[in-house]
Image (cartoon, rainbow, N blue to C red):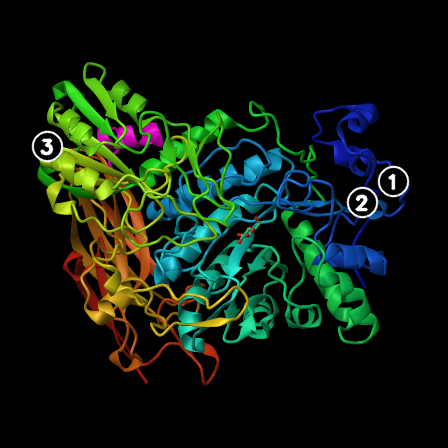
Amino acid sequence: MLDVSEITLAAPAWRRRSRAKGPLACLLILPLVLALAACGGSSSSFSIPTTGTPDQRADAVLAKMTQDEKLAMVQGGVTTNLEWGYTIPLGAAGWVPGIPRLSIPALYLADGSVGVGNAVGPATALPSSIASAASWDLNEATKYGTVIGTELADYGINVNLGGNTNLIGREPRDGRTFETKGEDPILAGKITAAHLTAIQAQHVIADIKHFAFNDQETGRTTANVIIDERSGRESDLLAFEIGVKDSNVQSVMCSYNLTNGQYDCENKYLLNEVLKTDWAFPGFVMSDWWATQSTVNAAVNGLDQEQPNQQYFSTLGQAITSGQVPQSRLDNMVHRILRSMFAVGIFDNPQNIQPILGYPPNTQLIPAAADAAVAQEIEEQGAVLLQNAGNQLPLSAANLQSIAIIGSHADSYVLSGGGSAQVQPIGGAMTGPQPCPPCWATVTWDPSSPLIAIQAKAPNAKVHFADGSDSTAAATLAASSQVAIVFVSQWASEGMDEPSLSLTDLTSATPINQDALVEAVAAANPHTIVVVENGGPILMPWLNQVSAVLEAWYPGQSGGPAIADLLFGVTDPSGKLPITFPASEAQLPRPAIPQPPDGVTPFDVNYTEGYNVGYKWYDVNGFTPLFSFGYGLSYTTFSITNAALVNNLSSTTNPNFQVTFNLANTGGVAGAEVAQVYLGMPASLNEPPKRLVGWQKVLLQPGASQAVTIEVDQNDSSHPMSYWDTDTSSWLVAPGTYTVYLGNSEAAASLTKVGTITVGQ
Ligand code: BGC
């Protein structure tokens, strides 16, 4: 018996946040069907329950639904917008029609890994998600998610398709690396969870994707990942487990690829066993776009909603009638969708606006100025200073008479990543070619000028620009300038992988050899600074020839001012790499990306590296990368003293260990350090030499110090001290000796041993 009290959901609830007042205004601005719902035009006497748990409320609604209504809810709707060459909803990536008879709102689905995506409307182009991960700061990650969630809600979107949590460290050439949170499952899981929690706080259902092992774009619809269970649980699946459990995210997007021979959107192990049983995920699984491969298998193995439109699930009703799919499965799918809507407050906080196609460019719907400031802050926290020979940086405006700015349209723009994560930035983008036929992504630059921002910092300096197409002209300009700042960039996109780790100019019909450009400029000016705008690791053959390198990622539409602040020391760089930069492609687990034989035949991608993803792979193989995971420089210096280990593992309520230490800013400017704790597992387990288990970012004024405690909680969703035991199908702590390290990157030279913990038999 349900313990719910019910009241009638009448028109006022739908209009509560409406900018258009009254039924007439509603009817003027809304399409007919939506208007009927929004304006209370339904003749329904059904009352949405207002109390009870999300599950109880969902059951009460489910009990009133007809079979046709249930079937409509588990597949994307078809409407009239032909923007993508197929019928899609009004400006978003997907749509599930509402049911006015029962006051069930429509679902509007839009991308949003780095800001609101699709053609929803102009939105704040945030720095890449990987920049958010590089901040190593969950508060910044919360701000990141809040911008996305708020702007989606302002546009009337109530389901976000961000949350890319694939562990791209397996394949750093992946074209979607910029959307991810790097190579470490715990860092990636925690940053993702912060994004998703913040999005759902705006009453927008968040989504974690692409579940799972979708780690290369090449042949993404036919790649068959081969991986053993323990490796999967301790790597890609761990990132998802943390993301799901820490955020209470209500939707999961299954991916195109196969895992161990089964397509992920009908993969019983992934969907029914791991996600829904082991992790007790209560929400719904939607397919990636056209990733559904069957009706019956998909339904019985755990898919809850086919997107974006009706292909396989259009025959779900017949499969139920014929007994191939139980009615209870359909009811469970609908229950999961409804309970998600209740859980994030979609019923209780109805949107005030319905999405329309292509909001005008100057729309005032979103808080653009405030969000631009957040975008700048995130970039300033996430950019990573990789090199600073002779303290070339920060630049001092007082001493500068001339600055050469070279390349990557740095006079007016910063580059962004492409694909479904593409944001249409406030102020209008500059677009270029579509470099990946038959891929549909267009090179897009965000309107933010590093040059103008740099000139503003050094008003007395002559600032000149060379576009980089002529390296001799660029070198001549550099030779006559006090410093040369070369902007190099690498476009990347969903639908393709990078041709290699070497800088490749995909943005122009006459590509620029950017490595040669940097070398020519560096030869002409000993004070050469390289700013990199890209999505992930690159090779830097010119590294020893330049003074400084700033990894800016795709910096978003406040990138220009953020880069200038970092170069001039208004903000101290404090980002740390969330992904290893290899010294060569030969160091990668797969030096060449596995290629599909054709577009339809599944082909194996064997994850022989197992759980040794990213830095774990380099450690196990004794490779020295170009830059280590966790690495990043600052304009100040820090010291760690009095490090000690406190062992509380015998506690029955909160088994943990703590690393306590004193962190001091020993340099001359304010700055933040990310203290990192790594754990070496008992030798008998054959685990990599160390794994990240905790960290803390601390901002200190010059001369200041702070007592810091990093607690590693064994009950945390990250299972920090455990390994996955395949015999018992559970996380276990093995007997043996655990070694605890503390430092500011995973490179051995950056770490000190704090102590050991012995776990008995
Ligand atoms: C991508 C998803 C995206 C979806 C909808 C697919 O191509 O893989 O990440 O959410 O399109 O745009």
Residues at marks 1 and 2, CA–CA distance in whole angstroms:
8 Å
Position of 51 compared to 565: left or right? right
Label 2 near ligand 1 (CB < 8 Å): no
In the image, residue 292 lies at what x, y percent?
63, 63
Q: Return the residue nearer the eye: 63 or 148.
A: 148
Q: Quadrant of the N terminus?
A: bottom right
Q: Which residue is at a point 41% across and 29% down the rendered structure image? A: 373
Q: Earlier in the sequence, mark 1 or mark 3?
A: 1
Name the residue beneath numbered marker 3. Answer: 524
Indicate the amino acid at tag 1: Ser
Position of 614 compared to 401: left or right? right
Name the residue beneath numbered marker 1. Answer: 42
Dividing the picture into quadrants, the one containing residue 323 is bottom right
Label 1: state its secondary structure: loop
Dividing the picture into quadrants, the one containing residue 322 is bottom right
Q: Which of marks 3 and 2 is nearer the N terminus?
A: 2
Main SS category, magenta section: helix
Q: Are marks 1 and 2 in contact (CB under 8 Å)?
A: yes
In the image, residue 635 lies at what x, y percent?
18, 37
In the image, residue 354 lies at what x, y percent?
70, 35
**Label number found at residue 103:** 2
Q: Which residue is at a point 51% across and 58% down the rendered structure image? A: 210
Label 1 vs label 3, nearer the camera: 3
Q: Return the residue nearer the eye: 184 or 287.
A: 287
Which residues are the magenta region?
559-572
Q: Quadrant of the C terminus?
A: bottom left
Label 2: state its secondary structure: loop
